[in-house]
Image (cartoon, grey):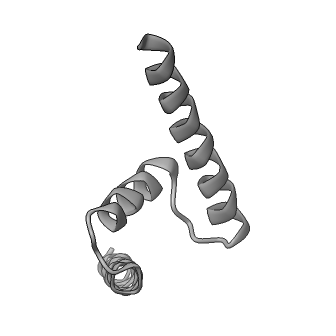
Amino acid sequence: MASAANANVNAVRETMDVLLEISRLLNTGLDMESLSICVRLCEQGINPEALSAVIKELRKASESLKASENCTN
């Protein structure tokens, strides 16, 4: 039983490592934690295209906020 659980954990870890490498090759800017959250959301039924759109919008908003903070400082 424990060996099956270990095999499953190793498979999940290997899958996440491959996904992270693909993410890096595509220059997504996602770290392991963010990528893991995205994968879990997709597994729960979230539309990947909608998730991508939300991430892009959040990045734009973050960049705008940083730019406005730089202008005031």
Report the front residue among 47 and 61.
47
Kindly indicate the quadrant of the structure image that contains residue 5. Answer: top left
Kindly give the residue lying farthest to the right in the view shown: 25
Measuring from the top left, give residue 62's x and y in whole percent. Answer: 34, 77
| Residue 18 horizontal side relative to residue 35, left or right | right
Q: In the image, residue 24 lies at what x, y percent?
A: 67, 62
Residue 62 drawn above or below residue 19: below
Which quadrant would residue 25 be assigned to in this image? bottom right
Residue 67 vs 22, above or below: the answer is below
Tell me: 38 left or right of 20: left
Residue visible at 56% across and 66% down in the picture: 29
Residue 4 vs residue 32, the one in the foreground: 4
Residue at the image point whose x is 35% and y is 67% from the top: 42
Q: Which sits in the foreground, 11 or 52? A: 11
Q: Looking at the image, is 73 positioned above or below residue 32? A: below
Q: Residue furthest front?
A: 1
Estimate the x, y position of residue 10 in percent, counting from the top left.
56, 30
Coordinates of residue 6 in the picture (x, y in percent): 50, 20
* Residue 38 lies in quadrant: bottom left
User: Which of 12/21 is in front?
Assistant: 12
- How many marks on residues? 0
Which quadrant, please, contains the N terminus?
top left
Residue 7 horizontal side relative to residue 37, left or right: right
Quadrant of the rendering where the C terminus is positioned? bottom left
Residue name at image x 40 percent, y 78 percent: 48
